[in-house]
Image (cartoon, rainbow, N blue to C red):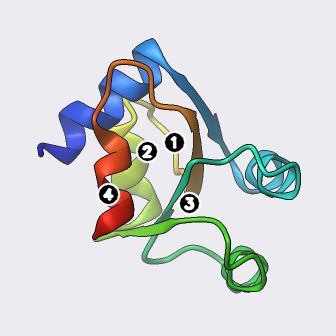
Amino acid sequence: MDFNLSLRRAMKTGEVTLGQNSVEKIVAENKAELVIIAKNAPAQIRNFLAANENVPLYEFDGSSRQLGKECGRDHMISVLAIVNAGESDILSLKSE
């Protein structure tokens, strides 16, 4: 699986939530299929996700700046939630 291609396809055809506050809300509502977090994400969101063990978590092997670029954005993204993968195979990361 090509992570970059899968992430962009999910963003284009599915439902992806970006940002710490939005992701916390989605996780609390049990709507997240997968959460992707950057290596340099703040401790606050890491602790929140650790307390919600029922959410599949994938650690992106890069910074929030790099994750933002993978999303096609020109700003940092420390965490995102896949609510609906659309035509993407990004949810295959759940088994890794």
Q: Measured from the top left, where is residue 82 in percent x and y?
A: 55, 41
Question: Which residue is label 1 attached to?
Answer: 75
Which residue type carries mark 1?
Answer: His
Question: Mark 3 and mark 1 in contact (Cβ < 8 Å)?
Answer: no
**How far apart are labels 2 and 1 at the CA level?**
6 Å
| Residue in the foreground of this view, choosing between 18 and 6 | 6
| Residue in the foreground of this view, choosing between 47 and 70 | 47
Q: Earlier in the sequence, mark 3 or mark 4?
A: 3
Q: In this view, does 16 lie above or below 38?
A: above
Question: Which residue is label 2 attached to?
Answer: 68
**How far apart are labels 4 and 1 at the CA level?**
24 Å
**How far apart are labels 3 and 4 at the CA level?**
17 Å
**How far apart are labels 1 and 3 at the CA level?**
10 Å
Q: Earlier in the sequence, mark 2 or mark 1?
A: 2
Q: In terms of image quadrants, where is residue 43?
A: bottom right
Question: Mark 1 and mark 4 in contact (Cβ < 8 Å)?
Answer: no
